[in-house]
Image: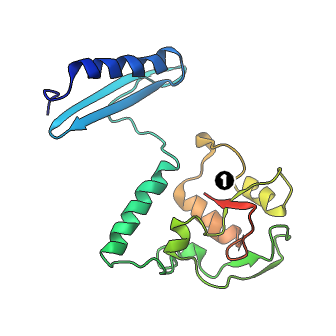
Amino acid sequence: MGTAGLSKPRLEQMHQQLSGFIERKEMPGLVALVSHHDDLHVETLGTLAFGNPAPMKRDTIFRIASITKLIAAAAAMILVEERKIRLDDSIEPWLPELANRRVLKSISSQLDDTVPAQRAITLRDLLTYRMGFGSVMAMPDTYPIQKLIREYRIGGDGPPRPAQTLGTDEWLQKLGSHVKPLNHLNTTNKTRSN
């Protein structure tokens, strides 16, 4: 694959713009890709991290955080369209850690003040960010659940900290096994799912 059909002046303009981010130290490095039909241009600039001289590479792995939500939603909707899953199917066959949950009676409840969830979490709940867990939009330690979220490092209590992020299996295990009192189906406007 080459860049024969791509505009060389525009690729140079893009290079200048992207280089500016590195020169101004707005980011340590980046990988950019432009493609049109069979023409492909990949550009790598900068380093892996500030203070790390290792160069950015074409195959560098990036943490893309919430962008994964869009990718997962598109994949799920393809499966819905192919009638392999339904929007109102329970997620419990795939995520048994979230089965048989108990939920807080209210956002201000103590962690043992729970009732059984009225129903299973569904694919629709996940895709519309209504699974019952997320950021608590209140000052720290306003509600008991905030302390638990912070202690278990399962998110929703500040900016992302990649170096402290749990692996998927451990995060899900803590969410399902240790943090049974979700806000699912007893939601308030004070919670926003991640």
Mark 1 secondary-structure assignment: loop
Report which quarter residue 13 is drawn in.
top left
Tell me the amino acid under the disc marked 1. Gly
Q: How many numbered marks does the figure carry?
A: 1
Q: Provide residue 135's location: percent of width, then percent of height.
A: 69, 56
Q: Provide residue 43's location: percent of width, then percent of height.
A: 31, 26
Q: Circle 1 sits on which residue?
A: 155
Q: Is residue 45 above or below residue 131?
A: above
Whether residue 87 sits left or right of residue 164 in the image: it is left
Report which quarter residue 101 is drawn in.
bottom right
Whether residue 158 sits left or right of residue 98 in the image: it is right
- The residue lying furthest to the top in this view is 23
Residue at image x 37%, y 30%?
Answer: 31
Residue at image x 71%, y 61%?
Answer: 191
Q: Nearer the viewer, residue 142 or 113?
A: 142
Q: Is residue 127 above or below residue 139?
A: below
Whether residue 67 sits left or right of residue 177 in the image: it is left
Report which quarter residue 34 is drawn in.
top left
Q: Quadrant of the C terminus?
A: bottom right
Q: Quadrant of the N terminus?
A: top left
